[in-house]
Image (cartoon, grey):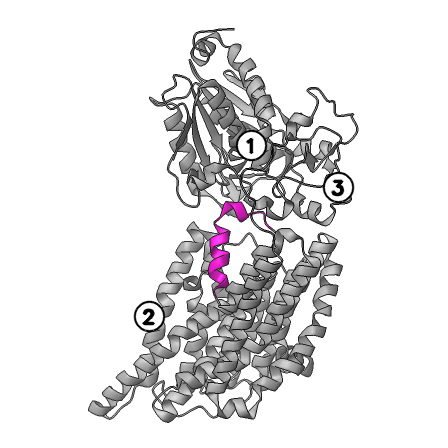
Amino acid sequence: MALTDPRPPAPHRGFRRDIEGVRALAVLLVMLGHAGVPFLPGGFVGVDVFFVISGFLITGLLVAELERTGRISLVGFYARRAKRLLPAVVVVLVTTLLLTLLFLPQLRWRDTAWDVVASGLYVMNWRLSAQAVDYLNADDAPSALQHFWSLAVEEQFYLVWPLLLIAVGVLAARFAARTGRRPLRPLAMVGLALIAVPSLLWSVHLTGTEPARAYFVTTTRLWELAVGAALAIAAGALARLPRAVAAALGWAGLAAVVGAGLVITPLTAFPGYAALLPTLGTAAIIAGGFTAGRAGPELLLGLRPMRAVGALSYSLYLWHWPLLVVAEARLGKLSVAEGLAVVTLSVVPAALAYRLVEDPVRRSPRLATEPVRALRLGLLCTVVPVVAAIAFQFGFAPAAPRPGQAAIPGAAALPSEQSAGDAPVVEQVDQIVPDPAVAREDVAEVYADGCIVSGTDSAARTCVYGDEQSDFSVALVGDSHAAQWFPALKKVAEARGWRLVTYIKSSCPFMTAGVLVKNQPFPSCVEWNDNVRTALTGPDRPDLVLATASSAYQVIRNGEPLHGAENEQATVDALRQAWSSITGPGTLVVALRDTPRPDFDIPECVSLHRDELSECGFSQQAAAELSASHERAATDLHGVVPLNLNEAICPATSCPPIIGGVLVYRDNNHLTATYAGTLAPRLGGALDGLVRARPDLARVAYDGAAG
């Protein structure tokens, strides 16, 4: 049967058991991967399997309608989508709001409400894409609705694809009027190529340059749906495959999909080239299934248990992830056994939703014969969660902090001297500033001022504060762990009449080695470092450089990340090289030790344990071991002096979450801007001592007073 043959193929004209089994395989990959099963690091490729299946099934229906009637009913198409998808979605979204209210920390309430809005409007992938490149959200707990990104990609595809097929139908009809032949399928394949080829090329490019954003955006995923659509268009030709060839193709495809789950990891650049493995593997299973029968993967995929899971796959996908997020919020990081228990329990609400909501609505005779009624139902299912989420925002979610809060002591409440052996400083207070529910927003003003370089940008962008005409200039250099010191350093500069210049790039330490960021190399960081070193040694070279950064980076050598002691030594060497390149007559580099890293979310912990704040302390010794790179690198290095102010951040053997009524951390590793501001007297005193020890600098810094 030629590609242009309009007749539907004889084999598998109805229900395909193997595809129901592939659905089961896809959702099991996703659920087991999310549960943390160690041998399945690439379980997320199950989403790519779903994309191909969706493209194949939906396009098959659209093309069949176009061939049968010469048109596509958009009302009918979107009515079918609405009754198939939206009733189950509204139940999950409203339930997630309820679970948020009952079990999640207040800190997550507003974000979850907005996630419900984005999910209900099928734009969640773009919201996640924006958050993926926003460093302020980098350490946030995952959204309970993060998995809705893939549903958004599909529906955005189906806003465009039926329209393109209608245009193809018009062209084919005109061609038939002139020639007597109606090349609908070849023209549809050309239309698909116009979508798939640019999308694949863009996916490869963006995955290499901005992998965090590439994972979620629609444009990097369209080609996967197009691969499935191409199978539907080529159904006639595929139905002519010899059974032995089809069987071999199907088994090879199954091996590719399972292999993708086993060998692809979160470190893999994805989607890009890597997505070809699960995508083409799924395509091979579907293509072979036309004629292979039980000689192919249908032998396994068509088994009753697999078909049962496949029937529930949509509902299982919707329910398992919110339950995992809620469980982890209440219990802490889940073990593999606990994760498996949660995803297994998700079968209960998934089955109930399928039996009571999804299947009855999908099979409703009235909705089948009255598509406008189905569209109205879909509109209602969209409006309900959106309105509920907005009402949740105003009725329950905490308001953003108001300016002009009363003065609070913060670090000023600490004694000037305190040893590590002192008792823990754990405060039980009625009011915490900032409130943990809105702590994420308590960031240094350099973010709002647009002073932070991020993503692929490598320009040595600066912002100037303090006395811009001062003869004494201070540069703050580093990543977000440098930015967190800005509130304190700004106060110091303003009090002394110094000029303060910022050089800050998110996720990028000031050093000569490349680093791994979000499991990928970060070439723009190397370029930014080169540009900053040039700026710091040029005509505007500062008198004092305050350099600091997170100590949690992995250095890359010969394309491979380093680990353990080797990584620590490479970090120290790269820091020393960077600092040595900018020291010289009239320039002092102050290497500020990285702040202690709790590595769990302090505001979330405080919001859950306001009556037992000791639950939110963390070991000073363990934190100190993680934050010493800068201090070690500064040892015995000419023109560089170390500075450690961590006794004012972790003043006891158990680091307290609140000091002087102020929440110390805004996430799991950054200081709140409020607390950082209260460190100004300590930072200023320390810098004064270091500057006065250099008479050449002191004469400039203090209007001629050298001591």
Residue holding disc 2: 194
* Mark 3 Cα-neighbour bin, 10 Å: few <14, some 14–19, many ≥20: some
- Amino acid type at circle 3 is Leu
- Amino acid type at circle 2 is Leu
Q: CA distance from mark 1 to mark 3?
A: 35 Å
Element type at mark 3: helix
Residue 246, visible in the rendered structure: no
The residue stretch that appears in magenta = 123-140
Q: CA distance from mark 1 to mark 2?
A: 46 Å
Give residue 192's position: percent from left, percent from top. Answer: 36, 74
Query: Which of marks 3 and 1 precedes in the sequence?
Result: 1
Residue under the point 64% across and 45% down:
436
Q: Is residue 137 magenta?
A: yes
Residue under the point 45% across and 69% down:
224
Is there CB contact under 8 Å for labels 2 and 3?
Answer: no
Q: Which mark is residue 613?
A: 3
Q: Is residue 697 magenta?
A: no
Give residue 458's position: percent from left, percent from top. Answer: 39, 39
Q: Please, what is the dominant secondary structure of the magenta stretch?
A: helix
Residue 669 occupies quadrant: top right
Query: Is 207 located above or below residue 117 in the figure?
Result: above
Q: Nearer the viewer, mark 1 or mark 3?
A: 3
Residue holding disc 1: 571
Query: Which of marks 2 and 1 precedes in the sequence?
Result: 2
Element type at mark 1: helix
Give residue 68's position: percent from left, percent from top. Answer: 38, 93
